[in-house]
Image (cartoon, rainbow, N blue to C red):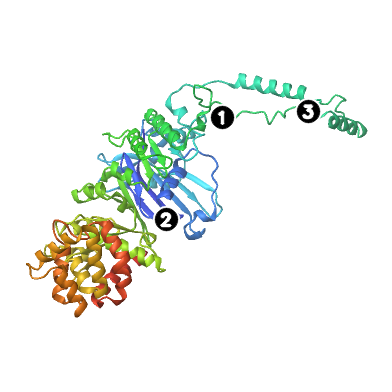
Amino acid sequence: MSRIRKLEIAHFRSIRQLAWCPSDGINCLIGPGDSGKSSILDAIDLCLGARRNIQFTDADFHRLDVGTPISISVTLGELDDGLKNLETYGMFVRGFYADSGLIEDEPEKDAETVLTVRLTVGSDLEPSWSLISARAEAQGLERNLSWGDRVRLAPTRIGVMADFHLSWRRGSVLNRVSDERADASAALAKAARDARAAFGDEVQDQLGATLGIVATTAKELGIPIGDNIKAMLDAHSVSFSGGTISLHDAEGIPLRGLGIGSARLLIAGLQRKAATRATIILIDELEHGLEPHRIIRLLGSLGAKETPPPLQVFVTTHSPVALQELAGNQLFVTRSGAEEHDVLKVGTANDIQSTIRKYPDAFLAPSVIVYEGASEVGLVRGLDQYRAANGYDAITAQGTALLDCGGGDADMPFKRASAFRALGYRAAVVRDDDKKPTAGVEAAFIAIGGTVVAWREGRALEDELFLSLTDDAVDKLIDRAIELHGEELVNEHIKSASQNGKDLNAIRMEALIEGVTTESRQILGRAARSRKAGWFKSVTWMEAVARDVVGPDLESAEVGFRALVEKAFAWTSNAGQ
């Protein structure tokens, strides 16, 4: 059955211009809000759906400019024999080149035979569908797909309401599973007549007075309706639509009463059974109504792990579970630019695929900050909480995800951040300077638009804290370390870091007499980042330290450290730029 080879959208809602060649299988659209994901699904549905009447409004035009028409073109490949019939569509067949995405009206032997359906809507808001071919246009020929072909090609849309697909309605998935049809017309007509008669007999006593008044009035006015008028169900009101026959469970309860998630799963499974008849399926917000394990089951039923893919699926999602379950070649990031929209394949390169597996939630934010380790993540989270409590916008409200690389290789944060940057995300790296990245790695990241916040020469985060905060804050950091790890361990770390030159009591006494010296601050920084048991080496520990100690002390802290912190937060506040 046919599959979409190319989608072209112009002047539709938030999309000024878009050209995209989707994959044959799962096409999962991700990206920030208002990037056009749902509009892409709607465009496919409007162009290929088998509906005779569609309501458009001025709001469907890009920037409400009704002077420029909406244009949605869908190029279909893998055509069956009926769609390649030369007598019917011969003047409209075209050639598609998968490697380049080009479409030509005079196809050569190595091009796939395709048809292009175009929907246009002008200022009169009247939709018009037609097949596109420069060859046919030159000869003044116009035509659309036959209604039967439109019904066969129409995508299945799985939305919040499942009633449509759980009844034998025109175009429902039940009518695509097999050729069986129930002829209920005679039985339904008799049931309607019986219902009208039964109601008329029962209601006479209830409405007798009113019926008498109507009969008298009619007689007075010379209207010949007889004396024995009746109240019966109106013949037009007792009618049955195409959805009269619907699915019920073993106890006779309609399946339209299923939960949203269960209904979606069932319809997706039925669509899979109908794959030989209709292969295109649309699902907005894939995760709606589904627990994580059922999201995985739904993706499995759609053929996410199968080769070749049984269905061509277009979905949107904000679920990290869905991202982890899918491969990078099934994920597409939507990006809105000033002139045109882009749909970028995430891809399966090692750096990208491993990043999806470990940090799927970061792909759902417009901006990403990558940190070397948990301490840096905790610092920013804690400072963010302190700032939010004092009237600043929270990082999460500004659309920024925080990503912990887990320490280790100094190049890894740049590899992770570059994977995001290549897909159009705003990306920054916050790093220590005690272990420097490979020469050129940082410069290459900056060259592609990345931002770097690095602690100063040779310093790790703990060095910056103990060298930059006030004596009072340093004292509080020591108290917090003792609270977390005990006085004995903290003392041992200080002695080891100073090669037994100082201990905890010596530094405490020094602080009381002359203030904490630079030498002691350096010792405390080294002690705090002890490799085996760092004082604040977890997100939770550093988060509390940043919220309770660093945040309140920041205005009085050393100016260079304060400038670095402010640079990181200024970057997050520019998320929309």
Quadrant assignment, res 304 = top left
Residue occupying the point 45% across, 23% down: 179
Residue 307 as seen in the image, left or right of residue 392: left
The reply to whether residue 518 is in sight is: yes
Residue 13 to residue 188: above or below: below
> Which badge, 1 or 3, is on the more N-terminal residue?
3
* Residue that sits furthest to the left in the current view: 499
Measured as percent of width and height from the top left, residue 419 is found at 23, 55
Q: Where residue 34 is drawn, which disc sits there?
A: 2
Residue ID at (29%, 77%): 556
Spot occupied by residue 483 in the image (x, y as percentages of width and height) = 25, 60
Q: Which mark is residue 231?
A: 3
Q: Residue 242 shows which numbered tag?
A: 1
Please, what secondary structure does the residue beneath circle 1 have?
A: loop
Which quadrant is home to the N terminus?
top left
Q: Are marks 2 and 1 in contact (CB under 8 Å)?
A: no
